[in-house]
Amino acid sequence: MAKSPSSGRSDAGPAASLTPAGLHVLIALLDGPLHGYGIMQRIFKHTDGRLRIGPGTLYRTIQYLVDEQMIEESASRPRPDRDDPRRRYYGLTKRGQRILEEEAARLRRLVRLAGNKRLRLGSTVPE
């Protein structure tokens, strides 16, 4: 099992430690680097307004994803007249892309399993 140099964690099953907030942040960054507020806006848009991540959750999640080398601070920035120099932009790393792909595959398998079990969304489980 390979270990991440920064955390000592195993690379086996890396998506297991990806929270829903982390998953949404990685998805938001698929279209390119964003600053924190831009990530919050993109998540809100992607979820049709059903998910609003607050600043505390967002910045804890960003720090975790940086520590785990799934995202990194990006040097890519908008034109100076459209930017605020205080903003920090983040982009997806190759590791982050791989983990996101693994998590998407895991979720597809889960949905397929639920469909195979004839799970009806909104129905109750017999007692």
Image: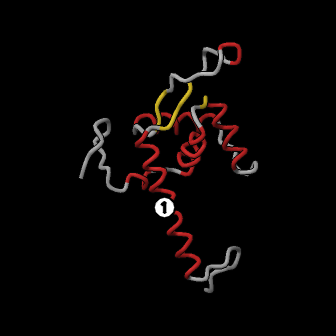
Q: Give how far across and how far down residue 58 sits, in percent.
A: 58, 37
Q: Position of residue 47 (x, y in %)?
A: 70, 51
From the viewer's perspective, is 58 left or right of 17? right
Q: Residue at x 67, y 18 (%)?
A: 83
Q: Is residue 32 left or right of residue 17?
A: right
Residue 88: x and y in percent read 56, 23
The part of the image, by quadrant, that contains residue 43 is top right
* Helix, strand or loop at mark 1: helix
Q: Where 77 sits versus 60, above or below?
A: above
Q: Which colour style is shown?
A: secondary structure
Residue at the far left in the pictured view? 1
CA neighbours of label 1 inside 10 A, class few (<14), some (14 to 19), many (20+): few
Residue extending furthest right?
Answer: 49
Q: Residue at x 54, y 49 (%)?
A: 23
Does residue 64 appear in the picture of this structure?
Answer: no
Q: Give the tally of numbered discs.
A: 1
- From the viewer's side, name the closer residue of 103 and 60: 103
Q: Quadrant of the C terminus?
A: bottom right
Q: Is residue 106 above or below residue 23?
A: below
Which residue is at a point 56% across and 51% down the rendered structure image?
20
Q: Is residue 13 visible?
A: yes
Task: Please determine whether, in this image, residue 74 is positioned above or below residue 53.
Answer: above
Q: Amino acid at mark 1?
A: Ala
x, y percent for residue 105 = 48, 61
Residue at numbered disc 1: 105
| Residue sitting at x 62%, y 86% | 126
